[in-house]
Amino acid sequence: MNDAAVDPSRRSRREARVANSVAIGGDSPIPADIGGTAAERPESRVVGRASSTPRRGAGFAGTWKPLAAALGALVVALAVGSLASIAFDGDSGRSIGGLAAALILGATGLALTARTRFAGFFSLRALDVLWALVLGVILPFLTGVFAPDLGFPALAALSPRWLLLGVAAPFVVVLGLMFFAIFFVYPAAESFAATRLTPVWSRVAAAAASTLAFAVVPAVFSPTVSGMPRAFLIGLGLAASVFVALSRRPWGPLLAGLIFTAVWVAMSAAGYLLA
């Protein structure tokens, strides 16, 4: 008996929902109370499409902004490193300057890499580890061909100074450059280039950018005392950039750089002992 009084209000509410959905979605929806699943309703389809769209880090990734930040970090790092070189004369000054510059760049890379990485960038494969072991051992001997002065022995005596500049500093420099060039500059450059180039050429451009970013500090400060000659570090940066361009993952290059540096330190100690 009361159905006749209730039905008009129900129809009014249903019609209001239909009108509202049409205004938002543009299609005639299927109300849930007269049949139709949630997947069939246009508003569900709209939400599904929106949720599958990747977000770009609040307008940071995929733009020129990360590359501008990298350039700014390089300018600051070179300025601080130059001041450190002036404060300490000679090869030790250049070593300390390169160390300071690498620390600034590494901190920048660690701070910003999470905002520029692409999907799957931080994954790890067993093949990456295998290639890292092979390249880490072979690369010092390959790049040594282009080094006119290998710097053996690293210093005149085994001392705390040698442990700082000949052992600790090479690892810090390599880690700083890896976190900056490979973890930060490469994905930033690839995501930016992908908006203008094909996927293959995007990787080529990103590898060139990360190689350049890796090579700036050794080219300016030439840390022949605190670690490797210029050719060693530039060769490592080139190999690491090609590695990350092929795998699109940074852990292999990082491991290869650590092994590379460990081989250098062992060669440096052997050069002192055999001198």
Image: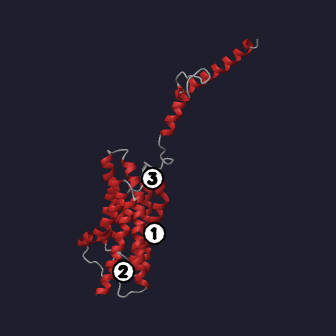
Could you say where residue 101 lies in the image, as x and y percent from the top left?
43, 69
Question: What residue does disc 1 label?
Answer: 103
Q: Is residue 259 left or right of residue 44?
A: left
* Whole-number angstrom distance, CA of label 2 to CA of label 3: 36 Å
48 lies above or below 181:
above
Q: Is residue 261 left or right of residue 37?
A: left
Which of pointers 2 and 1 indicates the residue nearer the eye?
Answer: 1
Which of pointers 2 and 3 indicates the residue nearer the eye?
Answer: 3
Residue type of the residue flagged with mark 3: Thr
Quadrant where the C terminus lies?
bottom left
On residue 116, the disc is: 3
User: Which residue shows up at 30% across the image and 53% down it?
Assistant: 204
Point out the tag, 2 or 3, that comes first from the N-terminus. Answer: 2
Numbered label tally: 3
On residue 91, the disc is: 2
Residue type of the residue flagged with mark 2: Asp
Point out the tag, 3 or 1, that comes first from the N-terminus. Answer: 1
Q: Residues within 10 Å of mark 2 (few under 14, many from 20)?
A: some
* Whole-number angstrom distance, CA of label 2 to CA of label 1: 18 Å
